[in-house]
Amino acid sequence: MKVKKRTVWLLTLVSLVAVISVFYIFEGNNTPNILTIFSDDTIEETDILGVNQNMTQPVNSESDLFQEVRLEQSNKRSQLREQLTQKIGSDQTTAEEKNAAFNEMDELIKLESSEAMLEMLIKSIGYSDALVRIEDEKVSVTVMSDEVSKQQANEITYIVRSELDDYVNVSVKFEPFN
């Protein structure tokens, strides 16, 4: 079975759209306000992204740590995705290898969207930040919370298990605010 280049490009494009969609869902609405270009305000008074520049937000080291871990994981997965794309597009790989690479890329996309969805669900129950990592058969969840209770851990475990039927090994860790 020979995979056509159009099919590979189409699947790559669909994968890219899925990743970008997840990114925009979590980033919120950051569309620039084009009308501010035509205003008479000074640079300091201009609010291009629609966000008040004078508003300060507290910076938590745990959130920064979560962002670092997310960025590191994203870089690793991007490299893997690039290798798989090259394998799929190569003329030297067999159809079975291309099929396996495509299936691995599909699993990678499902894994990323599952992690993002779980983070969103955990944040929706009242946690300021959550980090979900799925590796092998284990799901590791870290949330920012000063309170630590078995009930909270059980609630998070229940959410993970209800969304991911295949994963039984779920660990929950609480990181306190600084």
Image (cartoon, rainbow, N blue to C red):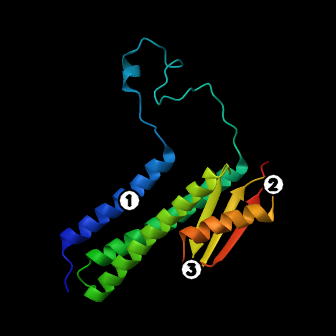
Q: Quadrant of residue 152?
A: bottom right
Residue 34: where, in percent of width, then height? 37, 26
Q: Is residue 40 left or right of residue 159?
A: left
Q: Tell me the residue that label 2 is attached to.
A: 147
Count the numbered circles shown. 3
Q: Earlier in the sequence, mark 1 or mark 2?
A: 1
Residue 27: where, in percent of width, then height? 50, 45
State how far apart marks 3 and 1 are (Cα): 22 Å
Q: Is residue 120 left or right of residue 63?
A: left
Q: Tell me the residue that label 1 is attached to.
A: 18
Closer to viewer: mark 1 or mark 2: 2
Residue located 49% across and 42% down the image: 28
Q: Tell me the residue that label 3 is attached to.
A: 136
Where disc 2 sits, the SS reads loop
Q: Quadrant of residue 121?
A: bottom right
Residue 82: where, in percent of width, then height? 38, 69
Q: In the image shown, does 9 or 28 lie closer to the viewer?
A: 28
Q: Earlier in the sequence, mark 3 or mark 1?
A: 1
Tell me the crowding category of disc 2: few under 14, some 14 to 19, or many 20 or more residues within 10 angstroms, Cα based: few
